[in-house]
Amino acid sequence: MKKGFEFKIEILGVPYTVICDEKKLAEACEEAGLEVEDTQGLHVAHDLESRKIYISPLLSPTQWVQTFLHEVLHAIGNITGHLILSQSRSKAEAFVDAVATGFTTVLKNHRVRQIIDLILKGGDEDEKSTDDS
Ligand SMILES: [Zn+2]
């Protein structure tokens, strides 16, 4: 069993804990009535005070990123009410998978990640002016 880890993120200003842990994913699957063997990731938002994204630590690096983005898309759907992102019907899942897989192929490019990082470090002019004051 791989050692688990977790970290906090905000999605559209909503706090989430991302949990990459085999045992905790298994427990969350049991609670959701899912087979852990068929589950790479899980978005849990029924407790609005502690929203969680679970990801299996047994995935390949590419699968991990794809699953992370997939669950983030579910979170965005849950927060914004866009049902195509939040429902777990097969048509919605296929859409979410296509977007997550597409972004994963783009983000696998190291230069793309470098440029995004560089541009974000530049910050918004608005943020800069408050930082400098
Ligand atoms: Zn899904």
Image: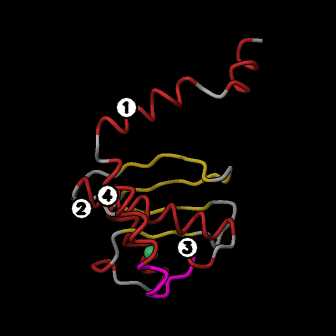
Residue of label 2:
58
Image position, residue 24 (x, y; %): 40, 64
Q: Does any atom of ligand 1 lie closer than 8 Å to the CB of label 2?
A: no
Image quarter where the C terminus lies is: top right
Q: Callout 3: few (<14), some (14-19), or many (20+) C-alpha neighbours within 10 Å? A: many
Residue of label 3:
85
Q: Nearer the viewer, mark 3 or mark 4?
A: 3
Q: Earlier in the sequence, mark 2 or mark 1?
A: 2
Q: Is residue 116 above or below residue 69?
A: above
Label 3 and label 4: CA atoms lie apart by: 19 Å
- Residue at 52% of width from left, 64% of height from top? 73
Give the prevailing secondary structure in the magenta stretch.
helix
Residue of label 1:
114
Q: Do the CB atoms of the residues marked 3 and 4 lie less than 8 Å apart? A: no
Of residues 9 and 20, the one drawn nearer to the viewer in this rendering: 9
Q: Nearer the viewer, mark 2 or mark 3?
A: 3
Label 1 and label 3: CA atoms lie apart by: 28 Å
